[in-house]
Image (cartoon, helix red, strand yellow):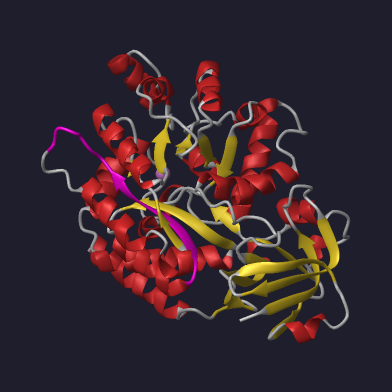
């Protein structure tokens, strides 16, 4: 179907970070076919015309690091140390998970993400076919990876096989809404030969890899003790770094680590909410950006955040860098908006997502900016980042289809999703 959004204020996130007043967005099939000012007679060219007077249209957020099904453990165990939280609370529940529970929790995550303006997410978890099922049904876009712990010498390893099966079945599925990457979990859960095996497979298939790196001080300390080098240097020396690699967190880095990431053109995903809640530290984002590293943004799982609200993440990211650098000019609005959209998309290998440009995928959100927190109207980008609410997202379009309109999710029964998730949480913790 072709759709015209008219009378809107457009935040394009194009190369000039342009804002267009009284603008129009034309959609045909799943692509943007017009971005610009209104021209008389436009309406006749489109099947559906949506008047966006008083509204702002911008690209949907790209949540580049998530474990969607962990919504099931949201607020189940908080204010704990990472290792105790994982081993005493999370792992025992994860052992009891089923495909249906993961599907239900993923639907819950997707409902929350759509409501807060996210149109693409990346996911690293297990029972990934059930996550793919949720992506297919809900209409959102996703890049999926099977989270893998592994040892190349283990003949019983089934995780890489599952990631490969996921790739065969779902890479490019649902009109290209899903793509599949590889998900070696971390340097302390995978051996170097195993990571090499995964890296070679990803190369062979022409896809990308996502891994957690240097999240905590403990991880770095243990790596120094075991291997004599930092986690980044370990991966560098093993030849496991290039532009197809996405590293989540990268909180505890040395100057030399940052230089290696820049040299190898590795993508970094910043997760400020999770880093704050787990007291992991403050990632040196400004330094990485200054060195030309592509840095995207993610929420991490909902049990260490505890929501999947990208707008909150944007705000935390910019505030944290300002304090960290002792500089209020650090990570300005345009930069943090790019991190949450085009940079995240580029990290995930999605070159046609994250900005309003002709030819790009029609993934966008309509924000109701006719509310007190957006007035007076000086700078709409500042208003969104510093004073907006994600609950002001009214309409969500993914791949040219209206998934949510005027606050109502059309693609699935949201109430049922909430109740099912509650049911599974009670089953798991009983
Ligand atoms: Ni994570």
In this rendering, position of residue 400 left or right of residue 428: right
> What are the residue bounds of the magenta stretch?
139-154
In this rendering, position of residue 17 left or right of residue 429: right
Q: Quadrant of ligand 1?
A: top left
Residue 367 showing in the rendered view: no
Within the image, what quadrant is residue 93 found in?
bottom left
Q: Is residue 427 above or below residue 268?
A: below
Within the image, what quadrant is residue 189 found in?
top left
Q: Is residue 234 above or below residue 182?
A: above
Residue 273 in magenta stretch = no
Q: Residue furthest left?
A: 155
The residue positioned 18% from the left and 48% from the top of the image is 158
Report x, y in % for residue 319.
67, 39
Report x, y in % for residue 17.
77, 49
Residue 147 in magenta stretch = yes
Residue 251 showing in the rendered view: yes
Report x, y in % for residue 128.
31, 58
> How many labels sit on residues?
0
Tell which of 197 and 387 is nearer to you: 197
The residue positioned 72% from the left and 72% from the top of the image is 26
Tell which of 159 and 413 is nearer to you: 159
The residue positioned 13% from the left and 36% from the top of the image is 154
Quadrant including the N terminus:
bottom right
Quadrant including the C terminus:
bottom left
The residue positioned 21% from the left and 53% from the top of the image is 95
Within the image, what quadrant is residue 174 found in?
bottom left
Report x, y in % for residue 326.
71, 26
In this rendering, position of residue 6 left or right of residue 165: right
Tell which of 179 and 65 is nearer to you: 179
Tell which of 334 and 209 is nearer to you: 209
């Amino acid at each position: 179907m072709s759709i015209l959004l008219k009378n809107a204020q457009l935040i394009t996130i194009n190369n000039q970070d342009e804002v267009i007043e009284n603008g129009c967005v034309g959609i045909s099939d799943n692509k943007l076919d017009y971005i610009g000012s209104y021209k008389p007679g436009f309406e006749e060219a489109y099947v559906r015309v949506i008047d966006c007077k008083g509204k702002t249209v911008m690209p949907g957020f790209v949540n580049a690091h998530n474990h969607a099904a962990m919504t099931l453990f949201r607020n189940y165990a908080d204010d704990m140390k990472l290792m105790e939280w994982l081993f005493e609370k999370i792992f025992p529940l994860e052992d009891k998970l089923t495909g249906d529970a993961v599907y239900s929790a993923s639907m819950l995550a997707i409902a929350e993400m759509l409501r807060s303006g996210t149109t693409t997410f990346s996911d690293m978890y297990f029972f990934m076919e059930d996550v793919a099922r949720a992506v297919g049904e809900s209409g959102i876009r996703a890049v999926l990876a099977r989270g893998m712990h592994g040892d190349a010498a283990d003949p019983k390893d089934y995780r890489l096989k599952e990631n490969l099966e996921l790739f065969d079945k779902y890479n490019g599925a649902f009109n290209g809404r899903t793509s599949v990457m590889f998900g070696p979990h971390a340097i302390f859960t995978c051996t170097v030969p195993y990571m090499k095996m995964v890296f070679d497979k990803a190369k062979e298939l022409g896809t990308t890899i996502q891994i957690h790196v240097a999240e905590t001080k403990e991880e770095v300390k243990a790596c120094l003790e075991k291997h004599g080098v930092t986690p980044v240097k370990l991966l560098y020396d093993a030849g496991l770094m290039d532009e197809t690699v996405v590293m989540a967190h990268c909180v505890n880095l040395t100057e030399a680590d940052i230089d290696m990431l820049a040299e190898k053109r590795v993508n970094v995903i910043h997760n400020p909410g999770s880093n704050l809640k787990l007291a992991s530290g403050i990632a040196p984002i400004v330094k990485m950006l200054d060195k030309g590293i592509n840095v995207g943004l993610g929420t991490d799982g909902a049990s260490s955040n505890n929501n999947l609200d990208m707008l909150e993440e944007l705000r935390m990211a910019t505030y944290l860098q300002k304090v960290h650098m002792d500089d209020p000019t650090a990570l300005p609005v345009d930069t943090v908006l790019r991190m949450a959209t085009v940079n995240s998309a580029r990290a995930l290998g999605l070159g046609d997502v994250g900005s309003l440009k002709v030819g790009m995928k029609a993934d966008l959100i309509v924000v109701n900016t006719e509310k007190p927190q957006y007035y007076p109207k000086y700078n709409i980008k500042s208003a969104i980042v510093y004073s907006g609410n994600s609950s002001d997202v009214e309409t969500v379009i993914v791949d040219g289809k209206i998934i949510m309109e005027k606050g109502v999710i059309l693609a699935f029964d949201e109430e049922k999703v909430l109740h099912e998730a509650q049911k599974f949480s009670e089953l798991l913790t009983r």
